[in-house]
Image (cartoon, grey):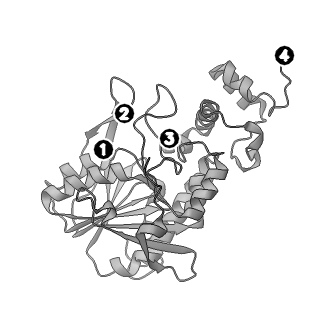
Amino acid sequence: MSERIFLENIGNFYATNAIGSAKVWEVRNLKNDPSLPPLIYVVESEAGQQFLLGRGLSGRPKFNLIRYIAKAMVEVFFEQWSRKDLSQYLILRGAYPFDLQYAMGASSPFDLHLLPTSFIRLQRVLNREGTDWEVQNQPLIGQYRGETWLIPDPTIASGSTLTSFLRNGFEHHLPKEVYILTAGGSLEGIQRIYQECQKKGVKLIPIFSQCIFEVSKVGNLPGRPLTDLSVLSPGSITTEAFYQKAYQRYQGKRMCCVGSFSESLEDPIGYSIHTLWEMQVLGMDPQKEDWKAWTINIQDKHFQKKLLHFNPALFDYFKEIFGEKHS
């Protein structure tokens, strides 16, 4: 196994925001791999760390973290973007918490004028194996325009969604450059997106939050779509300090830091049950988990009833936490 790479080994300090709460690493020619974009940014922020360590968070708290990550990114890159012909493309419904409109509105000219925004409508259908998504494009709400495209997407695993959008969008309008912003993105996904940009000579600049993930080929949960973005994966790249935080948080287990992002917003109970399931599969110790940090109260009898109905063995795994005694 190759030695783990940290951002300190490959990145250079690029910038920080005014109050120093966000720091940007600039990574050039990662691994000297021509299939990767020559320039990659990684933004460190408190919100970015909370997002990747907060697997128990769901609903409004998780929604808000994404907004704070967007704000941190905009604060650092606004000067770079302010003189460009910008257009934002927002995926419905998954990316709506990452809308840059609010974050951009703090500075001129966007304090008076809206950031031009169009909405990407995609239908994702599970493949026959139930392990990955097939993407079907639908008509754009808005118009293709702008020399610089900003595309925020909370999580990027395979990159198939944005690759499909760009392949279709470039036929309508060809920008000079595309910025991809992600709170939990994989290098494999960006590599796939970059190939599409290379075909048309469009510059791609990825902006990651906190970690450049390696997505594994096999997920932790059987029969579920692959959502395996773990800081502890051998090829994931972050700072050494954050790696140590994630190692402690996830008990040294390669747990996905995100899970299904859309489910975490729209079905917190289902999302929490799947999180417990992943903990069981990985053999994590329930006694070491900070349950007070969870959005869902796992002591709630309604929640426990749903968990028992989902999988009695899973319920039994957490029985002591519920204050129940083993028979």
Discs 2, 1 touching: Cβ within 8 Å? yes
Q: Amino acid at mark 4?
A: Ser
Q: Amino acid at mark 1?
A: Ser
What is the spatial separation of the Cα atoms under label 3 and label 2, in whole angstroms? Answer: 13 Å
Residue at left offset 70%, top offset 46%: 294
Q: Nearer the viewer, mark 4 or mark 2?
A: 4
Where is residue 236 shown, x and y percent of the image? Answer: 46, 53
Discs 3, 4 touching: Cβ within 8 Å? no
What is the spatial separation of the Cα atoms under label 3 and label 1, in whole angstroms? Answer: 16 Å
Q: Residues within 10 Å of mark 3 (few under 14, many from 20)?
A: some
What is the spatial separation of the Cα atoms under label 4 and label 2, in whole angstroms? Answer: 40 Å
Q: Residues within 10 Å of mark 4 (few under 14, many from 20)?
A: few
Q: Residues within 10 Å of mark 1 (few under 14, many from 20)?
A: some
Tag on residue 132? 2
Could you say whether the residue bearing mark 4 is in a helix, strand or loop?
Answer: loop
Q: Nearer the viewer, mark 4 or mark 1?
A: 4
Q: Amino acid at mark 2?
A: Asp
- The residue identified by callout 3 is 260
Tag on residue 160? 1
- The residue identified by callout 4 is 327
Tag on residue 51? none
